Amino acid sequence: MTPVSYLRAGSAADALRLGAVQGHRLLGGGTNLVDLMRKGVEQPGVLVDVTGLPALIEEAADGSIVIGAAARNSSVAAHPLVRTRYPMLSRAILGGASAQIRNMATVGGNLLQRTRCLYFADAAGSRCNKREPGSGCDARGGFTRYHAILGASPACIATHPSDMAVALAALDARVHLASAEGVRTLSLLDLHRLPGDRPDLETVLAPGEMIVAIELPPSDVAARSIYRKVRDRASYAFALVSVAAGLALDGDRIVDVRIALGGVAAKPWRALRAEATLRGGPATAEAFARAAEVELAEAAPLPGNAFKVPLATRTMAAVLAQLSGEQA
Amino acid sequence: MAIRINGTEVAPPEDARVSLLDLLRERLHLTGTKLGCNQGACGACTVLVDGNRVLSCLTLAVQVDGRTVTTIEGLGADGLHPLQAAFLEHDGLQCGYCTPGQICAASAMLAEVEAGVPSYVTRDLSGPVRLSRDEVRERMSGNLCRCGAHNGIVDAILAVAAERAA
């Protein structure tokens, strides 16, 4: 690890001022950044610890839940309002990492964590366009079991590793940002970028801009929602495929539905096509299977991860069937 | 400020790169906490910070300045901790390398259960938590045992949970 200095931000203004300096990086729990520093992938000159910033989880006047970016993952998952109103979010967080890591990781850091692509992490031995733009990609043609089947590019096939973000994508969460220029809010769906020819640019955050809070809007589908994660071992593993979904039914008719996929793309993948196929239609196994096929129609798998296309299709259909009360 | 480790105040290191794990083992010679993978995958380095279980290998020591750290030496300061005794009773170890991390993690896990914190396998997120084998296995999945003593570990934890409930 290269030498690094450590500062604590006492306020958001402090964090913005210190974080905007070239070579400075904001530090949350450190579960990803410290590891990447040790591997030589990240080499910040100064760490600005932002875990002292607001971590409150509060209900706003309009019924939204606002979560401070410094809230620990474990606090969000265990919060009574989240457990009862947004069960898919509690389950997604609880399905991620281990209890120790969830106690450390912050909400802001979770969203901004880097891919777990082995070639990205191998600074000494592998080429990576995300780590070093234009250098090439050794993942392509390598071990691609954990790589993307949707939205990838010739330059990069990495996936976003967060479980929490998949639920947030399905819940239409909003991200509150601040910078020296002021504040803005955007949909979580617009926070992360697909790789294109610049996989090193992972979000739309401007230099010096930071996440200050996440907002969960009131939702008709969230109360009846789940998160299912398919992985190589029963716990403490990254997703091969995951599905966050919520369903609102009127009898057998689908009034509204939200679906997002994890483990398949460089960002949490909101299944808008599947949702459009289902909305207003019947809640049947056939409809669920067809919607899943529509969503995965443009999947472009590699030989090492082609299994993810049927896996994602079946998992999505199974989750929707479970939500509609059928056995799956 | 200072880091309060097992009741003793310790100055944070000058070098911000020093992990909490290295501070404990290399500078304070509290070698109960173990170095396993050093990348957050095995749980051998688990300690408690302000009562919460964390990985000391991915924690920079400067991050815990002003906070309270408890290691296996702290848990066992007044004779064998009930979890230590239960691990012995139920063969919750073979080589013993992962045991300090297992016991630190288990002590925090029992507190989480008492506080009603759900896990990924908890059926009803809003109801009380009933500690089954599946619950213990899920909640302890961040601590790997390469000797494969997991069945004994689960037995030991369930025994302590049952004692506390009695």
Image (spheres, coloured by chain):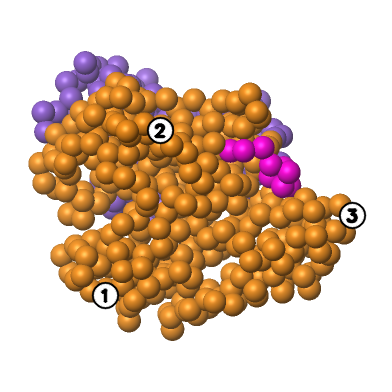
Q: Looking at the rendering, in which quadrant would you find the C terminus of chain B?
A: top right
Q: Mark 1 and mark 3: span between their CA atoms? A: 51 Å
Q: Earlier in the sequence, mark 2 or mark 3?
A: 2
Q: Determine if marks 2 and 1 fall on one subunit.
A: yes
Q: Secondary structure at mark 3?
A: loop
Q: Looking at the rendering, in which quadrant would you find the N terminus of chain B?
A: top left
* Res A193 → quadrant: bottom left
The residue where tag 3 is placed is A251
Residue B78, placed above or below residue B72: above
Residue drawn 31% across the image and 69% down it: A197
Q: Nearer the viewer, mark 1 or mark 3?
A: 3
Chain letter of the residue beneath label 2 in the structure image = A
Q: Mark 2 and mark 1: span between their CA atoms? A: 39 Å
Label of residue A138 in the image: 1
Task: Tell me whether circle 2 and circle 1 mark residues in contact (CB < 8 Å).
Answer: no
Q: Colour of chain B?
A: purple
The residue where tag 2 is placed is A183
| A151 on left or right of A246 | left
Q: Secondary structure at mark 1?
A: loop
Residue type marked 2: Val
Q: Position of residue A31 (x, y in %)?
A: 33, 44
Residue drawn 34% across the image and 76% down it: A154
Which contiguous range is marked in magenta? A216-224
Residue drawn 45% across the image and 69% down it: A151
**Magenta span includes A219:** yes
